[in-house]
Amino acid sequence: MTSVAGLPRLNEPAPAFQARTTHGDRSLADYRGKWLVLFSHPADFTPVCTTEFIAFARAADRFAAVNAELLGLSIDSLFSHLAWVRNIEEKFGVIIPFPIIEDLKMEVAAAYGMVHPGAADTQAVRATFLIDPKGALRAMVYYPMSNGRSIEEILRLLVALQTSDEHGVATPEGWAPGGRVIVPPPKTAAAAASRAGEGYETTDWYFSTRAL
């Protein structure tokens, strides 16, 4: 079994970076105090990536509303990024409002494990990283180069993480705002015995939910 090397770890500090982008220089420290959605794409001027960037752009205000900023990356030049952004505006009528990292030396891609064995040297997989306001990596999702990711799911996951942090709860499969949340299970025999009388909707001692 081949081990995966170079992947950052969840709940640990995200790898720091300093990079040129279409909006000027950016570093991880610039996003302190906000959530950051850092996402890579295989290459500029490719159809699947174009659909994703359009969807991210259209959802940018919704990410901003939950204190999150978007930051793209591919192993292409700054000039290629600028030309592609202009092309998307001209051909699709969509303005890309977020920066895109130029990563010709693959430094950020390598730090985040964006280039997997078997991928072309000039292409990063479709990776998405959610980094919290303290700079900790909270989630990472990988897609193959052939299939676009769901921006709705990324936004849903971001809000779910924020909800868990704020209320000390977990969220069930497919949870969306307004849905019931999962209460942490008891950790002692006494707590398990008293769980049914604590006012939650309890199926069994380990499974209780509540409304927010």
Image (spheres, rainbow, N blue to C red):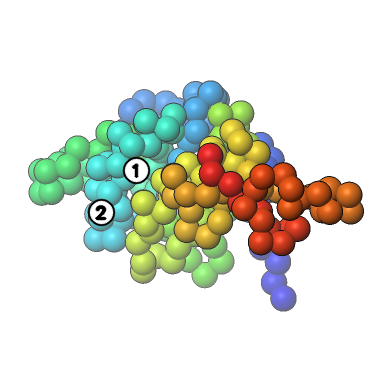
Q: Residue at x 71, y 61 (%)?
A: 204
Tell me the SS state at disc 1.
loop
Q: Is residue 161 visible?
A: no
Q: Which residue is more in the foreground, 4 or 166?
A: 166
Residue hosting label 1: 77
> Can see residue 202?
yes
Q: Nearer the viewer, mark 2 or mark 1?
A: 2
* Residue designated by label 2: 50
Q: Are marks 2 and 1 in contact (CB under 8 Å)?
A: no
Cα–Cα gap, marks 2 and 1: 16 Å
Q: Which image quadrant: the N terminus?
A: bottom right
Judge from the rendering whether residue 137 lies leftward or rightward of residue 24; answer left or right: right
Identify which residue is drawn at 70% across, 66% down: 3
Classify mark 2: helix, strand or loop.
helix
**Image location (x, y in percent) of residue 156:** 44, 48
Taking depth in this image into account, of 199 and 143 the one nearest to the observer is 199
Q: Earlier in the sequence, mark 2 or mark 1?
A: 2
Query: In the image, is 99 to the left or to the right of 199?
Result: left
Residue 32, given in percent of the width and then of the height, sits at 54, 24
Q: Amino acid at mark 2?
A: Thr
Residue visible at 65% across and 39% down in the picture: 168
Closer to us: 184 or 13: 184
Name the kind of residue labelled 1 in the image: Ser
Residue 155 coordinates in the image, percent (x, y): 41, 46
Residue at horizontal 38%, vertical 36%? Answer: 63
Give the percent coordinates (x, y) of residue 52.
Answer: 30, 53
Disc 2 crowd, CA 10 A, few/some/many (<14, 14-19, 20+):
many
